Image: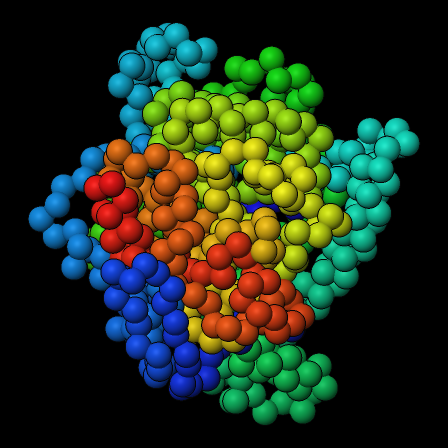
């Protein structure tokens, strides 16, 4: 399933807030020249509102939060230095390029005259001033497994796997519908009991009704509030959950629905390649929420008292709209990667992915093309809590066809961590795998831009990927002579080690850090820049 689907809210599987204090072991595995952390970290609590909005920039030693030491890098390594602008391609759901906190960060095609209806740069895309919308007016789409099942039984193993997973996913969606309908009714009951449209945990204590339905609703909401994060909002979060569940049934898993027909192209023909338009946030700007959030993580303006902070402002964000609500098309991803490469992107963020990829070779070829052009591709590992090294947990795209040999050395795959260093630091929703996941980055409760000058906390490996991509862009800005593969290995090699034992997946099974990823590490900007400095002098 597409990573654009954020880790959904479940009333009985909400992220649990960390305890007030804990003594934790922190180990930094980096070259000897890089200062290592003290062995004992005393967890401070609670996290301030300001720190929560930018925790991925904080430092494990100084702040006792496993951020990427971005502030430390600026304070101690980058003062007085001037980097070059780096074009970052964001292949996603579209971006609100008019957002107040992205001003000056949006790529403009220097070879295109805006609004003249002419393909000035003769690349086949008319007036592609800020990027290209390969989806046109598509908003919703099927999952890839749905598309495979719709085509009928061709006798292939792929069809059998798709049908099995489709039936499981459909049954799961029906159960989710029951749950979300129940929660919506509970929420309605509480609001009526309180005679209030909005409420908090402490308001529940004022309910004295002996009506069994009200009493049960009070018990349920008390449990939800207790287990939810500080940003939990019953009305907004339940509505988001409802929309996701209903979209699954109405669009993603609906075999009668064909979102592609509004585009009028053939998704099985890679040569039919100039569809879409230049409206990079799509037909409904609000639906560009995911891509706008990703863009903000990388490049929202630093220290302007708006929203959160981006990793780097030496960036030009190039928009490639290619990921709908549902699964992306292999064709759109392949064309989108090539488009970003051809327009100068040095880093491409891909917060997308799916379990089936009928035309994966097109995507592999586009990634190899990016490698030849020295472009780093940063991918989200996915939000199923799976070991994606296992064949049954296929996750595309990836950088190896056989789980042994990488076909290109310009792809890095990112898992997600939360803000509490310890056994549970890896987000329960994050995929993992010692072959197919490279390194981890902050991905839970990340605050960034969303459409129409708003901001929001979102979570998923979709948020971890741009955190890592932002650090990659920072390296490529200050050390532009380093190659994409060098930047990839710097991000991997310079990271901070995860704890020796970590809980993985939704079942929180405790395993050694070697089972988590290739490195067992978390991205660290400070260490990465020190390593980049040394590598650039060789």
Q: Quadrant of the C terminus?
A: top left
Q: Is residue 261 visible?
A: yes
**Residue 157 quadrant:** top right
Residue under the point 86% across and 33% down: 156
Residue under the point 25% across and 60% down: 33
Q: Is residue 100 visible?
A: no
Is 494 situated above or below 198? above
Residue under the point 86% across and 40% down: 160
Residue 361: horizontal and vertical position, in percent? 64, 27
Query: Depth check: 223 or 130 in front?
Result: 130
The residue furthest left is 80
Q: Is residue 92 left or right of residue 168?
A: left
Q: Is residue 458 left or right of residue 509?
A: left
Residue under the point 21% across and 42% down: 537
Is 337 situated above or below 290? above
Residue 107: horizontal and vertical position, in percent? 30, 30
């Amino acid at each position: 399933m597409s990573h654009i689907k954020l880790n959904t809210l479940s009333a009985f599987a909400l992220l649990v807030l960390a305890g007030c204090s804990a003594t934790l072991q922190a180990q930094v595995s980096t070259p000897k020249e890089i200062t290592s952390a003290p062995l004992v970290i005393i967890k401070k609590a609670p996290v301030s509102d300001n720190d929560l909005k930018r925790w991925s920039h904080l430092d494990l030693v100084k702040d006792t939060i496993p951020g990427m030491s971005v502030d430390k890098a600026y304070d101690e390594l980058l003062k007085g230095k001037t980097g070059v602008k780096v074009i970052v391609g964001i292949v996603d759901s579209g971006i609100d390029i008019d957002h107040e906190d992205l001003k000056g960060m949006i790529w403009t095609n220097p070879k295109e005259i805006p609004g003249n209806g002419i393909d000035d740069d003769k690349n086949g895309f008319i007036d592609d001033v800020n990027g290209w919308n390969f989806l046109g007016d598509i908003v919703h789409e099927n999952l890839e497994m749905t598309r495979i099942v719709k085509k009928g039984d061709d006798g292939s193993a792929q069809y059998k796997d798709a049908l099995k997973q489709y039936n499981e996913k459909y049954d799961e969606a029906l159960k989710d519908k029951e749950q979300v309908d129940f929660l919506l009714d509970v929420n309605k009951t509480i609001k009526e009991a309180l005679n209030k449209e909005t409420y908090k945990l402490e308001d529940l204590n004022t309910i004295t009704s002996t009506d069994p339905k009200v009493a049960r609703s009070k018990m349920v909401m008390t449990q939800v509030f207790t287990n939810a994060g500080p940003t939990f909002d019953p009305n907004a979060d339940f509505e988001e959950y409802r929309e996701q569940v209903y979209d699954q049934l109405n669009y993603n898993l609906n075999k009668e629905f064909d979102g592609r027909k509004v585009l009028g192209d053939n998704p099985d023909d890679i040569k039919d390649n100039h569809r879409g338009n230049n409206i990079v946030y799509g037909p409904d700007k609000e639906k560009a929420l995911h891509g706008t959030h990703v863009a903000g993580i990388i490049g929202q303006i630093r220290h302007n008292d708006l929203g959160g902070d981006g990793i780097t402002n030496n960036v030009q964000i190039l928009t490639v709209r290619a990921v709908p609500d549902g699964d992306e098309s292999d064709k759109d991803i392949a064309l989108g990667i090539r488009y970003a490469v051809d327009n100068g992107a040095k880093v491409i963020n891909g917060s997308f992915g799916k379990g089936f990829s009928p035309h994966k070779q097109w995507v592999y070829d586009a990634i190899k093309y990016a490698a030849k052009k020295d472009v780093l591709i940063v991918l989200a590992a996915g939000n199923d809590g799976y070991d994606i090294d296992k064949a049954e947990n296929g996750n595309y795209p990836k950088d190896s066809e056989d789980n042994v040999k990488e076909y290109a050395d310009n792809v890095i795959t990112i898992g997600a961590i939360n803000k509490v260093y310890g056994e549970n630091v890896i987000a329960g929703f994050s995929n993992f795998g010692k072959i197919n996941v490279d390194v981890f980055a902050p991905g839970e409760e990340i605050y960034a831009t969303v459409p129409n000058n708003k901001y929001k906390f979102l979570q998923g490996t979709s948020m971890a990927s741009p955190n890592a991509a932002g650090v990659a862009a920072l390296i490529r800005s200050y050390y532009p002579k380093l190659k994409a593969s060098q930047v990839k290995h710097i991000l991997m090699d310079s990271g901070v080690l995860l704890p020796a034992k970590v809980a993985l997946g939704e079942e929180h099974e405790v395993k050694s850090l070697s089972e988590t990823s290739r490195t067992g590490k978390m991205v660290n900007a400070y260490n990465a820049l020190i390593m980049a400095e040394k590598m650039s002098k060789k």
